[in-house]
Each structure stands twice: as structure tokens, then as C-alpha cells.
């Protein structure tokens, strides 16, 4: 079994402290609380994607949701550990093409090469690698709305412009070229926790 396919509890718990003070570690059952809750709607869409793409998504014990309805300064990437009944919130950037004025709000999606925009829909996590942003993880888009993800090099990586101090100073994160960029402090524990062949689902609700 790959080291990335093992759940390292000590790494997961690191998210709850230090620079990630705004993060949550709560029972995932809380996702079902409250009619109209955006996270509940997003989780429902993710479960539908798991059913639709179950032949390629081998691991269904945990997944990642990204709610692009929220501003970039707000933690809007949710790690959902379905097996252990826990969830975690992190900050994550969106693409500059989705927010040309750098307002901190995603305005539009695009799947077009060169758009530098974020794409919506279901992704499967693939291999990790060392790139210009350090340790990163490739993503494969599973829907018409994001099936150019590999060609566009849309990945998960760490970046200084997603660090908590940027959000505190500017009231928003910097922008990526469409990648899911989290803080430099959180990228390693995130990738250790996530591993390959799991679902990342991004959308607005």
C-alpha cells in the first residue's frame, strides 16, 4: 500500500492548530444540519459524483469539497473524513481568470486552456510530484466542465499567496492560474491525508 493511501491522523490534526486557527474539526454529521446549508448541497452533489464515477474513484472513505460561493478569505475547502466522521476547513485560492478584478470572489468558471480560471465539477486525485510550487498533486477532471484539467496543469499545491497572513492583511487570498492553492504550511499534511484516487468536488451553491 502506498504511503499516500494511509491515513496519518497526526498530520490531519495539525490542521486544527497554529496557522490554521480558523479551521474546524467537527463531526461530519453536522453537514446535514440546517435546511439550505450550502455544504449539505455540495456534499449531495459530491455523493452523486461518487455514484456516477465510482468505477474510477477507488477510495470513498474521504473526499474534498470546495465551495466557490464563499470569498477567498473564508475557509472554503472542506476535508470530509467519511470513515471517521470528521471534517476540516482550509482556505484555498481561485484562478485569476475567474476574478479579473481581484475582488476575492469567484465570478465565473472556465475549462478553456489559457483562461487562468477555476473549473467546476468532479476531479479525481492523481500522483504527487515536485514542481515549481514544491510538492503538488495532479488532478484529472471527470466532467465536461473540467476535462481539460490535465492539459491545463490544474493541480493542488501550496503558495505564499494562500497563507493565512495574506488573508488577514488583504482580506482575500492571491489568485492562482486555476489551481487549488492552499497555504504553504498546510500542503504537506493535506496531501498526506488525501492521497490518490479520491474525489475533489468544486462548485458554487
Image (spheres, rainbow, N blue to C red):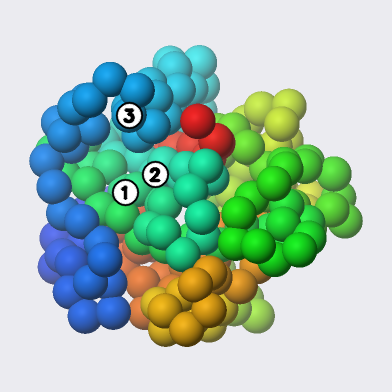
In 3D space, how far apart are the residues under numbered discs 1 and 3 (Cα atoms)? 17 Å
The reply to whether residue 13 is in sight is yes
> Reading the chain from its start, which is encountered first: label 3 or label 2?
3
Observer-nearest of 96 and 49: 96
Q: Which residue is mark 3?
A: 37
Sort mark 2 into few (<14), some (14-19) or many (20+) by Cα contacts within 10 Å.
Answer: many
Q: Say which element carries label 3.
A: loop
Q: Tell me the residue at 64%/50% (across/down).
A: 106
Instruction: Please identify, in this view, whether the residue under mark 3 or under mark 2 is nearer the observer.
Output: 3
| Left or right, 95 with reference to 188 | right
Q: Tell me the residue at 72%/43% (across/down).
A: 108
Q: Tell me the residue at 71%/31% (across/down).
A: 145
> Reading the chain from its start, which is encountered first: label 1 or label 2?
2
Q: Say which element carries label 1.
A: strand
Dots 1, 2 in contact, CB < 8 A: yes
Observer-nearest of 119 and 193: 119
Q: Which residue is mark 2?
A: 64
In 3D space, how far apart are the residues under numbered discs 1 and 2 (Cα atoms)? 5 Å
Residue 25 found in image quarter? bottom left
In this view, 97 is above or below 171 = above
> Reading the chain from its start, which is encountered first: label 1 or label 3?
3
Whole-percent x and y of residue 194?
35, 53
Q: Tell me the residue at 72%/41% (across/down).
A: 109
Whole-percent x and y of residue 23?
25, 62
Q: Which residue is mark 1?
A: 79
Observer-nearest of 19 and 52: 19
In 3D space, how far apart are the residues under numbered discs 3 and 2 (Cα atoms)? 17 Å
Residue 100 found in image quarter? bottom right
| Left or right, 87 with reference to 2 | left
Dots 1, 3 in contact, CB < 8 A: no
The reply to whether residue 55 is in sight is no
Amino acid at each position: 500500500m502506498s504511503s499516500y493511501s494511509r491515513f496519518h491522523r497526526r498530520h490531519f490534526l495539525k490542521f486544527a492548530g497554529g496557522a490554521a486557527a480558523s479551521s474546524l474539526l467537527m463531526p461530519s454529521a453536522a453537514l446535514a444540519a440546517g435546511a439550505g446549508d450550502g455544504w449539505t448541497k455540495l456534499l449531495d452533489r459530491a455523493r452523486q459524483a461518487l455514484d456516477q464515477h465510482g468505477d474510477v474513484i477507488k477510495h470513498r472513505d474521504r473526499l474534498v469539497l470546495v465551495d466557490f460561493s464563499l470569498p477567498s478569505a473564508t475557509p472554503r475547502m472542506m476535508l470530509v473524513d467519511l470513515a471517521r466522521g470528521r471534517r476540516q476547513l482550509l482556505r484555498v485560492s481561485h484562478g485569476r481568470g475567474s476574478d479579473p478584478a481581484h475582488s476575492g470572489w469567484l465570478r465565473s468558471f472556465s475549462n478553456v486552456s489559457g483562461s487562468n480560471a477555476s473549473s467546476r465539477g468532479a476531479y479525481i486525485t492523481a500522483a504527487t510530484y515536485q514542481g515549481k510550487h514544491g510538492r503538488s498533486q495532479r488532478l484529472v477532471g471527470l466532467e465536461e466542465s473540467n476535462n481539460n484539467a490535465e492539459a491545463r496543469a490544474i493541480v493542488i499545491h501550496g503558495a505564499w499567496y494562500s497563507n493565512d497572513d495574506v488573508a488577514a492583511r488583504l482580506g482575500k487570498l492571491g489568485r492562482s492560474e486555476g489551481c487549488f492553492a492552499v497555504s504553504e504550511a498546510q500542503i504537506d499534511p493535506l496531501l498526506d491525508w488525501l492521497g490518490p484516487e479520491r474525489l475533489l468536488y468544486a462548485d458554487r451553491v
